[in-house]
Amino acid sequence: MPKNSKVTQREHSSEHVTESVADLLALEEPVDYKQSVLNVAGEAGGKQKAAEEELDSEDRPAWNSKLQYILAQIGFSVGLGNIWRFPYLCQKNGGGAYLVPYLVLLIIIGIPLFFLELAVGQRIRRGSIGVWHYVCPRLGGIGFSSCIVCLFVGLYYNVIIGWSVFYFFKSFQYPLPWSECPVVRNGTVAVVEAECEKSSATTYFWYREALDISNSISESGGLNWKMTLCLLVAWSIVGMAVVKGIQSSGKVMYFSSLFPYVVLACFLVRGLLLRGAVDGILHMFTPKLDKMLDPQVWREAATQVFFALGLGFGGVIAFSSYNKQDNNCHFDAALVSFINFFTSVLATLVVFAVLGFKANIMNEKCVVENAEKILGYLNTNVLSRDLIPPHVNFSHLTTKDYAEMYNVIMTVKENQFSALGLNPCLLEDELNKSVQGTGLAFIAFTEAMTHFPASPFWSVMFFLMLINLGLGSMIGTMAGITTPIIDTFKVPKEMFTVGCCVFAFFVGLLFVQRSGNYFVTMFDDYSATLPLTVIVILENIAVAWIYGTKKFMQELTEMLGFRPYRFYFYMWKFVSPLCMAVLTTASIIQLGVTPPGYSAWIKEEAAERYLYFPNWAMALLITLIIVATLPIPVVFVLRHFHLLSDGSNTLSVSYKKGRMMKDISNLEENDETRFILSKVPSEAPSPMPTHRSYLGPGSTSPLDTSGNPNGRYGSGYLLASTPESEL
């Protein structure tokens, strides 16, 4: 080897040397490829694989254990939606009948696409931007759209954690502050707050004490300083959890992912011991079969599958990118999906057991109030005592006795019955009062807990559980933002992460105005749903139709050591894209047919009223959807017309600690490549590494070994590389 060679100089220097491949081969003596880490044939294959793994491990962090990784995926996928949205959808869409479409869609869409995201992240070992740049450069905008959607979701999701923080600190007092209506003094007379008296103590505390909400989205009302402080606390917690990447967030997951199951188990045992819990559970599991034929039910089930597994956000890909290449992500996909579904069912059992208890209490309260009305009518001779069955005892009136008395009065006083204002007080009516989202957690469930013995303890546990569920999801959401940006643009991890949290806090002030809850509804219900469906269907198309399902299955076989079930081939190729296309079309039609709106709390009426978004809010909503999906067509057009390079024609080699690594330089396709790889540029094999999925139209898989006498790649050596060199 010449003494003036850059490689020879490198052996006596600690500097990082980069030189073109042509210069390298012109100056260096022949290499013994059998002993080189670049050899891919014969007995050296094991060394080549070990070298690749060693190079990857130098440049990318890894999970400390498989358990830590699984807990991270569970923490991201199992979130607040499992606690308050899944039970609401069960209640709204036919009880046990809703489980049928959900399970069907979980099997044909959820698990296959979850496995797909796990596989591409683990194979390419990059965040969403790098992954989709590798799979199909023209669809590289998918990764940028995922980051934007994660940002939108993170902005409002952490506000919900802030609400939970507020309730958590308010729970350390007895009685709970939302257990009774406040009393105000009007001169010398003490009266119950009118807004609270018209609604309920928990409803009043939520809308007035916690949110101090305005009457509409157009009435800002200024910042709610209590919620502003809670939002600051929430972002501080998230920032500390993710500032070091998986080194910090992985440790947090041991608590944030496991603690909610401890609380759910405690609540389930406590709930089953409550009077009326069985009524709630039976109501939940009694199927209404007609709901199974409703297209709206299937659309909502599909949307819940996406949000439950975190599809399209980029968090799944980010977490799996820190795995070793031989990790069994096929097993991981099935395990996490099952645990997610199990958690949803467990949470639904808890919710309906507690709501069954609450329904019995409210039903008994209804019986007492209406019995007092009947006694008043009897005392004023509006009703005859002959209408009251002789066995009825008003001092110990049961719901069965009241129902019998109610039916007699309604039959005899048929014409005048409506004027009496009596309520039937049916338990079924109480159980059918569907409450969703924040209303379920912060109104219905908190009201039920006020009737628990030691209610502050249960309240502290419940809201600490919500904080941890939200934190697990926020860690995955932040990973969906930071991992692809750090991988692609090489920005400092800690500085960028802290900057993201600070930026998100200030933008999040939009959600802690007095009208902030209405903006949360806008972002939660509308801004993310349509972009996510577009992202997921394009991910599926990019792998199954552009890169090729067969080639992808071949790469999975090499990576996993076994061939995945044929089931996934047909799901990726045909069933999932078709179902996704139907869902996207249905979402667009639904958005056009039903104008977007929100439930506003009207202070004077002490009741909710459904309002449509004003024109400026509709413009904002449309802008959010466009911004989230815009990178996809922009990147496609730029790369289609070659206005943005995909990096596929650049290749150079650098030395570091005596090993060969791939880096970026301005090597033209028709220049030095011809001297290295073949006589004519068109005959040169692709310089892409094994994990680069996108080979272009008509290309063959890098795993195809036919006709290659010198090994799988048609050459006696392989350039060991790291994925970031092509980003």
Image (tube, rainbow, N blue to C red):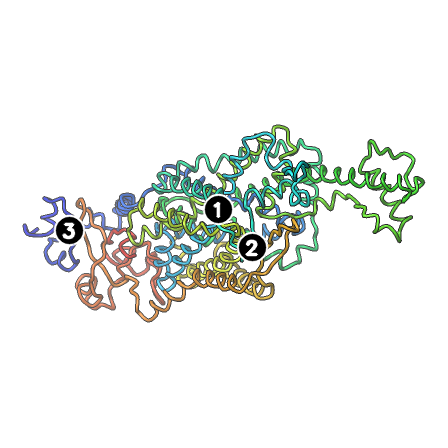
Residue 263 found in image quarter: top right
- Which one is closest to the eye, mark 3 or mark 1? 1
Secondary element under disc 2, as helix, strand or loop, is: helix
Within-10-Å neighbours for mark 2: few <14, some 14–19, many 20+: many
Secondary element under disc 1, as helix, strand or loop, is: helix
At 11% from the left and 58% from the top, the residue drawn is 26
x%, y% of residue 461?
A: 54, 33
Residue 504 relative to residue 294: left or right: left
Whether the residues at callouts 3 and 2 have beta carbons within 8 Å, the answer is no
Figure check: 396 above or below 12: above
**On the image, numbered disc 2 is attached to which residue?**
302
How far apart marks 3 and 2 lie (CA) works out to: 52 Å
Q: Amino acid at mark 1?
A: Val
Within-10-Å neighbours for mark 3: few <14, some 14–19, many 20+: some
Figure check: 542 above or below 72: below
**On the image, numbered disc 1 is attached to which residue?**
159
**On the image, numbered disc 3 is attached to which residue?**
17
